[in-house]
Each structure stands twice: as structure tokens, then as C-alpha cells.
Amino acid sequence: MASIQIIESLKKIYENLLQNTNNDFCRDRENRINPSKYGPIVLVWERWVGKTYLLLQKLKKQKKKSFYFAADNPLVQWISLFDLVSKLYFDYGIRYLVIDEINKWEDWMGNLKAIIDSFVDLELIVSGSSSLDLYKGTSDLQRRIYKIDLFPLNFVEYLEYEQKVQLPLYSFEEIIDNHKEISYDLATKFDKKDFENYLCYWFYPYFKNKKEIYHNLLLNNLKKTILEDLPTFMNLQTSSLAKIEKLFYFIAKNHPSELNYKSLAEKIGIPKELLENIVYYLDQIGVVNIAIRTNKLTDIIRKEFKIFLWNPNMYYAYKSSDNIWTMRESFVLHALKKISKSQVVNENIILPQYWDIIYKHKWEHYLFEVWWKNKTSKQIKDIRNSFIVVDDLIWSDNRIPLRLFGLVK
């Protein structure tokens, strides 16, 4: 049973965290993290997207009696999670509870199920890094919880956080239907250099005052994900984990169309079947981006994929700035997954044989050609819902600025 001393210590930690939290910039514009509306919420995050600070911001606005603790805190590692929540509920009157890093707790799935079933009026938010066991656990509890994938900062959030510039977010339909008007409106709101900096450095909040070491931090974070998340779900030897680091180098340095499982397996020295499983799981935890080559069932079964790093910041971390077309395509793919509210393999996003990306949205298909040297509108002029994605804020019926994909909700 959780002791009073432990809870009082956790309370002091919580109060201290709240005192050092401000709401000058809050990411949850749409109030998606709302347990009173959606019921128990499970937040799945990449590392370093700012989850703890966002949760504390939500708590600071909360009027109900609330509490926060992290499951990886040594104070609570050896006590029952259910007993701790029970004591907070009955003895302290807590009705709004946030449990951070819940996947670090032994038997967290069974405890979470019991908590949800036992305290029906408790507004509950639990979170954890995008580890594979968290994905598995939330799928087992999908009838009881509302799961949210939190993505890195979009361009609007970066401008507000770093430049104090506020821009609206737009739906996918607004970007498609009104891209000319939006382009005109944005022309004087920010400089092109802002977007270039965003692609290079600013997907993660830990960039603040750390620009010189940002890419090193990103690579260290990636290494930690490999060493901690993969072994919890796959029985990998240390030698295999070391070879996986080489995998990211080859993805960063080569065009996706030049990559396949056979050649990658030979380059990094692990069996092809093992590599296929590793890449699939890396997609699940948000460090690579797998896109299906076509939507034919036979191709999906044959694993016809293209592989990207998860976002352009990673390409810059591997000093692949000359691979500009791949970074642009990676950025558009990342944005489309954000629209779909899922960071895993998505059958609505197709990389066809003759064009860059086809996106299925509300029963309509949209074709995007990411601009490069010899691409022109003539290539897509007879195709319905087709667009060239361009660098500059150029407005025409079928040319959409790349930056607009950083403004989608």
C-alpha cells in the first residue's frame, strides 16, 4: 500500500513542477487532450517532443483536484500502481490524474485496465514514449481508451514558440481549396529563411538555446531509442543493435528508390527477414517512415515499400543536406501522416510507380509531385486533384507551396 510519506513527496514534486510551468505557448490548440470529453486518454509520443511540459500546462489550467506523477520515479517503482491511485482517489479526493511514462511500470496494462474500470469518474491521462510495448498495450485496451499520437512541432508551432509569430492552422481541405489565397496572405508574415531553419533544426522543443549541439542531441536520442525501445520487443543481440545505427546512415545518404531490404541487409550485415521486422518496428516508434509503394494487396504482402527518415531534421543530422528532394518528400509524407493522426504505416498514403505521393482523404485521391529540377505541371495536367509542391510561395491552380504542409491541423 502506498504510504502517506510517498504521496506527500510526490505532491511536493508536482507542486514544484507546476511553479516552473507557464502557458505562454501551449501545443494543444484544438483541446484534443480532454478526458472529460473523450474518456481515459493514452498519449503516445516520440522522445523529446515536450510531453511532460504539455501535460503540466494542462494541469495548471485544471480546476478539479488534480495530481501528477511519473511512473519512472524511484519513489513509486516498488509499490502497486492500483493501490497508489486508489489512495489518491479515496483519501485525497483526486479526480483529475496524469501518469507519465506509464509503460515503465511493471504490469502497467493490467493496472491501467483495473483503474479505468474501478474509478469511472476519474479523468485520467497516461503517457509514455513511443515504445513498442506501449503500442501493444494500447491496442489491447482500445475499447477503453482514446489514443493520441503527438507529433513533433509543426511550422506554425515553431513560429509561435521561437519567433513569437502567430499563424492559423488549416484543414487539409482548406489547403487544397484555398492555397492561392493562403499563399498571398502568408507572403509578408515570415521569411523563407524561417522555413529553411525549421526543416534543419526545429522539429523538437529541445532546440531552445542549443542550436550548436541540436543535431548531436537528435542522434543521441535516436541511439537511445534503438538501445531501449527495440530490445523490449525484439530479442536482439548487441551486435545487431550496433549494426542498426548503420541503417540510418544508408537511409539518409541514399534516395529511397535506391533502397530495398536485400541491399540494406547486405550493407549492414544482418539477415533480410530480421531487417524487415526491424524496419517495421522502427516505423511504429517514429524514427523511420515507411510508405507503401502501391495499394495492391500483392505488393503490400511482398513488402513493396520506400523508406525515409522520420523528418527532415534527421537528414540534416546525418549531413545529408544535398539530398534536398528526399527531404522535401519526407516532409510532405510526415505532414500527411499528421493529417491522418497516425504515425505508423498508413494505407491512405501511397507511393505509386510514376509519381511521388497519392493521398486518399475522405474517399478522394490527391496526387502530389514534389518539385525538382525538371518537373513541370505538364506531367500532371490531365490528372484530377493533382498538384506540384514547390519551394516558393508561388500561387496557381495546381502549384502548392511546400510550407503550407507545415500549417495543417
Image (spheres, helix red, strand yellow):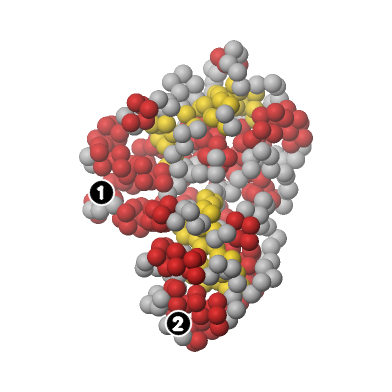
Upstream in sequence: badge 1 or badge 2? 2
Taking the spot 76% from the left edge, 30% from the top edge, the residue there is: 181
Q: Quadrant of residue 369?
A: top right
CB atoms of marks 1 and 2 within 8 Å: no
Q: Could you say which disc has been placed on residue 268 in the image? A: none
Disc 1 marks which amino acid? Ser
Residue 389 position (above or below residue 72): above
Q: Is residue 104 above or below residue 265?
A: below
Q: Secondary structure at mark 1?
A: helix
Between 249 and 186, the residue placed more toward the observer is: 186
The x, y position of residue 28, in whole percent, is 64, 54
Quarter of the picture containing the N terminus is bottom left
Circle 2 SS class:
loop
Residue found at x 29% / y 52%: 234
Crowd band around label 1 with a 10 angstrom C-alpha radius: few (<14), some (14–19), many (20+): some
Q: Nearer the viewer, residue 173 or 122?
A: 122
> To which residue does mark 1 refer?
240
Q: Amino acid at mark 2?
A: Ala
Residue 316 lies, with reference to residue 230, above or below; the image says above
Residue 110 x, y percent position in the rendering = 39, 65
Quadrant (top left/top right/bottom left/bottom right) for the C terminus = top right
Where residue 222 sits: x, y (%)? 41, 51
* Residue 389 visible here: yes
Which numbered mark, 1 or 2, is in the foreground of this view?
Answer: 2
Which residue is tagged 2? 2
